[in-house]
Image: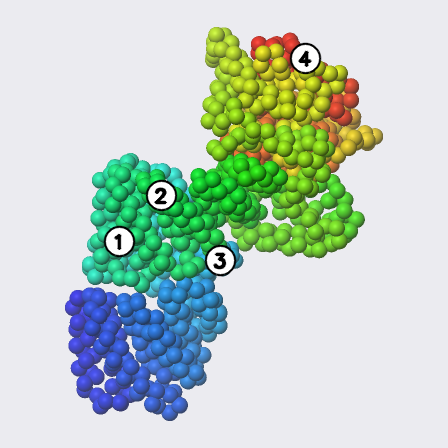
Amino acid sequence: MSRYARDAVDHWRRAAAGQPRGDRRWAEAQVELGAALLDRHHADQAREDLIEATVVLEAAIRTMADSFLAEELGTTHGVRALSTYTDVLLARARIDSDPQLLDIAEQYLQFAEDASADLGNSALLMLKTCQVHRARHTFDGSVDTLYRLTAIAKLAESWISEEHRPVLRGIHAEALLRAYQLTGVEDYVDEAMELVSSVDTTGPNQDQIVMLRARCLLARAAGTTHTADVERAVAVLREHTPQSNGPRFLAGQTLLTLVDRTGRAELLGPAWEEFTAALNTVGEGHPEYRMALASLSNVGMKTHQLTGDISALESAIGLLRRALALSVRGEANHALYLDQLGYSLRLLYDATREPAYLEEALVLLRRALDALPARDPQRVKTGLSIAQALRATYLRTGETALLTKAAERARAAGRIDSGAVPARIQAFDKAAYTLTALGRWEEATEAFDEAITLLPRLASRGRTRHDQYADLGSTAGLAATAASCAIGAGQPERALELLERGRGLLLHQRLTGDGEWAALQRADPRLAADFQRMRRDFEAPAPEAPRPTTFGRDRETEWNVLLATIRELPGLGDFLRPPSARQLLDQVDGTVIVPIASELRCDALILRQHRVTVLPLPDLSLTDAMTQLRLLQEATTTAYDPTADARSRLRAQSVLTGVLEWLWRALVGPVLDRIDAPGAAAELPRVWWCPVGPLAFFPLHAAQAAGRSALDRVVSSYTPTVTALARKRTGVRQSRADARSCVVAMRATPGGPQALPSAEREAVAAAGALPGAWLGLDAAATRRHVLDRLAGSAYAHFACHAVADPHDPAQGRLLVHDHQDSPLTVADVSQLDLDAEFAFLSACATAQAPPTLVDEALHITGAFQLAGFRHVIGTLWEIDDAVSLTLTTAFYQHGDATGAAAYALHAAVRALRDRYPLAPTLWAAHIHTGG
């Protein structure tokens, strides 16, 4: 107990005793005595000080209330009395877990506000009422309580003094931040950030404002996986000199968040220092002491996760047990301590296989879930932890009833709409997998459906493209597994729908069917113009800024409002909606093969004659596919590695030949046999391949074994999704007399790879075959010139180098003359809005995408599709300059290559295959994508 607090209590006790009871000066002394008792409580946490403070303040307030019309309560002294009394009741409510004390405080404040004739004093009373609602929310967890708080705060804003405005805005911002966490409405967090950004961080509540700024950044980062906002929050907190423990706790927690996202173990030390500093400033009875113990425990747990050190985990559990022993039910963090201890014990079980740890973990996690408010986002993670613990218990005991409970718990967690979307998707995914283990395929399909329904929120236009890539990448394989589950449930059409809804999310935002667009133009030209404008402005690749701005959020809202308006027009109710399987089957004219490899099973969906059938592929497995993909990538890299010797290059060709043989046996051969593709014919049938996941990296069109080859049985094309094919597939197009072409050739690339001596001759061949060709050669092929020419072209041919960016696919680029300063990127090309026919990309690996985003077609070939080209020829890996000239010449000599691009490419590739049968890297890379 501080000497100052004890002396203050003694002084005001004597002052009150020296005045007649009921006198105004006695009442004022009682108020100061109550304030001193509250200060002493803050120093040593003695509950009896709060009880005495309640008694003396109530006596003072009753005296003021007995004045004429209770006018004393509306004075400065009255406001101080009520403010102090409210603070005392808030402290008692927290310690005693008694929300009824808040009702008493609110009644007193309302009575005083009614009696006050001074707007400034009324605003101060409103400020205290906001604090009461903030405390009430910790008990009821209701978003309505937050709404009442924000309404009062907005009213008080007009009359509050500049001295108290920072406190009011801090409380208001905190409520908005919590409302955002419960509802996901981004307006709230943006408004909260605006409020705290308007407040000086050097005032008396500087800690609160700094913390709120950091918490806003963390809230906006919570639904993402990038680190920019988290790093900004760390900087905000560590650059501030804290006046209390709040910033220390938040700085440590933010450092741990950064550890989770980066795996940087060196950040654990600074986090430990922050929590230790907080622990050393308070006594054992203080709530912050328990928080510090739990926070230090979290550091120990993460140390175990990064290093496998069991002793660090055991120490973490000891710290948590101590924190929980000092905590009481109803305390704000009690449920979190239960959850953290339960999770830690589950980790200890995983490390030791001691059943007692798992049993205790389940008990604690259930208690934690019971203690959390109904809409608390933490319920998602706690519910998922319970499901995982139940599954672990099943694996130990074999009791299948536990799996049923685990699935129910995980699915319930996924349905908590206040939770972060990635966590909810994970919960549904776990529920579905658990149901498949029980053989309940239809229920599992429903759970997968719920997960896929959430995926578009990860691709929201209001998010940065880095957030989109990271979160969509974290769900890689979900659509394939969901489709496999539906096939297992005997629902092949639903499998197709799940694939179409779960893949190509960014692609489908941009694709509009020709029929849909024409119908919109006929129905409402003004809305059609708005749609085109917003698609250009709002559907460009998301910005590189660390987070979406308010404009980004409004962009999403405005787009959705426009779509809703369009869908009210006659005949346009399904405009840009994901098509049903029946709609797709009716729209697709031809044979489409959708190969699927998942952990559950491997099949091919065959779309033909307006039906979908399933072909099981027993010789295909996801594990084998990943192994063969690694061999494919190593072989195609070695074959073009200038440092590799001749023997290594020959071995690479042999390895790739083996991959093509596996591909034939496991996938392509059985499919072509099922569809009765002829062994030889004058005109081979068309087939569109729509491979899912890692199968998209393979040259399915080039599969061959034992004298049998896909090239001899079908003409192959590719499509990223069936929806993309259905929306862009059209009949034979009439050639346009005024059509123009853009042809680019880079013989030498400044600051780039080796020269391409055949590029000029290749471009000349293309320019001679394409109508109205502009030839941009070397220095003439700048980014600006190329984009300008593309904007008015129906045809394009590029003979140059290309670079894929595995970390930021939108920055994949064609290397034009000024690529070092002004690169021609995927983002640039995809923003074009063309009605174009054909693009030939004679460059390296233009159809290469990051493994986790392969289903999004985020590559250079995909960019030209998005730009509006119906047919695009791209490459799966690096290509040879001289062979490219041979292939291109043969392609354009085929006749009307632009009108029959798939057939022309097929003929050229087959001729190269016949010429270089033992070197598949030379002829298997080129693919045709489109209708």
| Whole-percent x, y for residue 894 in the image | 75, 17
CA distance separating discs 3 and 2: 38 Å
- For image coordinates 50% across by 17% down, the residue present is 635
Q: Which residue is mark 2?
A: 399
Between the residue at mark 2 and the residue at mark 1, the CA separation in whole angstroms equals 39 Å
State the CA–CA distance, disc 3 to disc 1.
29 Å
Residue 568 occupies which quadrant of the picture? Answer: bottom right
Tag in front: 2 or 1 = 2
Report the residue at 25% width, 38% height from top: 352
First along the sequence among labels 3 and 4: 3
In the image, is residue 493 above or below residue 205? above
Answer with the quarter of the image where residue 751 lies.
top right
Can you identify the residue that label 3 sits on?
Answer: 183
Residue hosting label 4: 911
For marks 1 and 4 on the same chain, the one whose residue lies earlier in the sequence: 1
Is label 2 in contact with label 4 (beta carbons under 8 Å)? no
Q: Amino acid at mark 2?
A: Glu
Q: Residue at x 32, y 47 (%)?
A: 343
**Residue labelled with disc 1:** 292
The percent position of residue 533, horizontal first and vertical second, equals: 69, 47
Please indicate, yes or no, whether residue 362 appears anywhere in the rendered image: yes
